[in-house]
């Protein structure tokens, strides 16, 4: 991977951001003279910056920190919350001021790793903690073979199906293959007043819908070193997506359909099949608890398991290198099964650890998601060209719904990715 001078690249942006953002001044140095509550030994202060996933995120972290500090009186954790809209800008400002957080919860991290700013996972968590992560998630946290991120939360897609509409349409079995999904959706579209399958190819998440189908044919978007969109496996999947549209088994105007309103339609009982997330289970309980629905693995070409996986991570900026032991204590505590599953369940996500999955295995609503995690396919977020690829999917993939050939669309997206090198 080409190294980029991150500090130099963000100077201008950071200067402008500094006028808008109020830095909390969290530094990377040790507190020196601070003592434990009983007056013995020095206290290491960790500065932790995280985004809000929900209205309860701050309270959840405060509880974790309170309990951790009670068990580790030689470590203090300063928590800073930021919105997703602001967090990356605040982080860049802190990096410019040599005040990067010791613990950071974020998304893309390849640039930080390439610049040598991040501590390897092996330096900030015990061997047992690192080994507990699902292999597919751990591999997604590596840059040039070294793992830097500790996967925090997972989200996978599963097939949500409306039992009432299936019965009305005479569909007996839940689809497991593309052909079965096509025929089931066609029956729902033709024999009920609802649409068969929801295919959101608008700019909210066209890349997500696409990767679900690509993964179902053994495809992906590439890896850390190469973006690979225009491939035979992906083309076959894109052409089947186009077949679904041409055969009228999807909702109208899939090229401009956004995921959130599409899933709201499923929750309202007006859609036969859709790929949805663990959080939608809670949405259904709240908004339409009488909906008769089920959750099953993603339908793939052959029926073999595959799904889209999305993860955020915790990482640690090295700063002066004196806090690795304290960071390790926190990471080991947080990712212990009891602490971690309480946090991740409250946020409505899936665990990234094997111990967490084992602990939640009894939750029948989560079981289809948990079963698919080992076969999750991820966005190549460690590739510097991923942002351009993501944008190209969001703006161009919907063209398959307007009659443009799938081959031409994939070639156009690949060209955008290649131009970003």
Image (cartoon, rainbow, N blue to C red):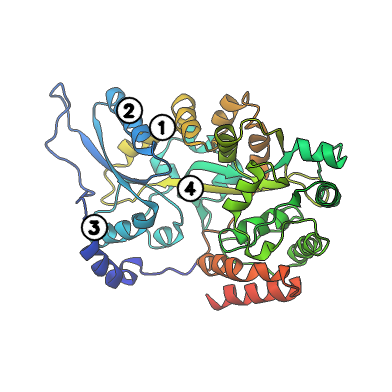
Determine which of the numbered discs, if any, sits on residue 334 in the image: 1
Residue at 83% from the left image edge and 36% from the top image edge:
167
- Badge 3: few (under 14), some or many (20 or more) residues near its Cα, within 10 Å? some
**Residue on which the image places disc 4:** 312
Compared across the picture, whether 197 is left or right of 8 comes to right
Q: Looking at the image, is mark 4 or mark 1 earlier in the sequence?
A: 4
Secondary structure under badge 1? helix
Q: In which quarter of the image is residue 393?
A: bottom right
Determine which of the numbered discs, if any, sits on residue 386 in the image: none
Would you place residue 14 above or below residue 86 in this image? below
Residue at 49% from the left image edge and 27% from the top image edge:
337
Determine which of the numbered discs, if any, sits on residue 98 in the image: 3
Q: Looking at the image, is mark 2 or mark 3 earlier in the sequence?
A: 2
x and y, in percent, of residue 155 in the image: 57, 43
Q: Nearer the viewer, mark 4 or mark 1?
A: 4
**Residue on which the image places disc 2:** 68
Q: Looking at the image, is mark 1 or mark 2 earlier in the sequence?
A: 2
Q: Looking at the image, is mark 2 or mark 4 earlier in the sequence?
A: 2
Q: Looking at the image, is mark 3 or mark 1 earlier in the sequence?
A: 3
- Disc 3 versus disc 1: distance between alpha carbons? 26 Å
Q: Is residue 329 visible?
A: no
- Disc 4 versus disc 3: distance between alpha carbons? 24 Å
- Disc 2 versus disc 3: distance between alpha carbons? 27 Å
x and y, in percent, of residue 218 in the image: 75, 55
The residue nearer to you, when weighing 245 against 39, is 245
Q: Which of marks 4 and 3 is in front?
A: 4
């Amino acid at each position: 991977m080409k190294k980029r001078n991150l500090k130099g690249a963000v100077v201008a942006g950071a200067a402008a951001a500094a006028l808008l953002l109020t830095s909390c001044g969290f530094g990377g140095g040790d507190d020196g003279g601070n003592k434990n509550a009983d007056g013995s030994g020095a206290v290491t202060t960790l500065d932790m910056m995280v985004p809000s996933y929900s209205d309860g995120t701050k309270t959840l972290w405060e509880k974790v920190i309170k309990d951790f500090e009670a068990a580790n009186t030689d470590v203090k954790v300063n928590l800073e919350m930021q919105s997703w809209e602001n967090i990356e800008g605040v982080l860049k400002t802190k990096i410019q001021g040599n005040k990067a957080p010791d613990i950071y919860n974020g998304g893309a991290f390849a640039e930080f790793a390439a610049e040598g700013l991040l501590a390897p996972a092996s330096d900030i968590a015990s061997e047992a903690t690192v080994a507990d992560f699902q292999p597919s998630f751990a591999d997604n946290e590596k840059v040039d073979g070294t793992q830097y991120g500790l996967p925090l939360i997972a989200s996978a897609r599963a097939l949500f199906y409306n039992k009432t509409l299936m019965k009305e349409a005479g569909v007996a079995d839940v689809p497991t293959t593309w052909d079965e999904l096509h025929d089931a959706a066609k029956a729902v579209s033709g024999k009920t007043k609802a649409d068969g399958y929801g295919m959101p190819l608008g700019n909210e998440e066209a890349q997500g819908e696409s990767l679900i189908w690509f993964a179902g044919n053994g495809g992906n978007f590439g890896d850390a070193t190469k973006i690979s969109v225009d491939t035979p496996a992906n083309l076959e999947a894109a052409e089947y997506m186009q077949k679904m549209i041409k055969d009228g088994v999807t909702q109208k105007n899939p090229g401009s359909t956004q995921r959130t309103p599409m899933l709201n339609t499923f929750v309202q009982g007006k859609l036969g099949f859709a790929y949805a997330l663990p959080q939608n289970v809670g949405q259904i309980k709240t908004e339409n608890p009488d909906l008769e629905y089920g959750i099953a693995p993603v339908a793939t070409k052959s029926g073999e398991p595959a799904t889209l996986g999305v993860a955020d991570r915790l990482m640690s900026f090295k700063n002066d290198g004196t806090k690795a032991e304290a960071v390790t204590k926190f990471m080991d505590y947080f990712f212990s099964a009891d602490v971690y599953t309480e946090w991740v369940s409250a946020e409505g996500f899936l665990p990234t650890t094997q111990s967490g999955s084992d602990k939640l295995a009894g939750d029948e609503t989560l079981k289809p998601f948990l079963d698919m995690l080992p076969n999750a396919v991820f966005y190549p977020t460690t590739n510097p060209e991923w942002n351009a690829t993501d944008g190209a999917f969001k703006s161009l993939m919907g063209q398959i719904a307007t009659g443009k050939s799938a081959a031409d669309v994939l070639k156009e997206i690949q060209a955008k990715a290649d131009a970003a090198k």
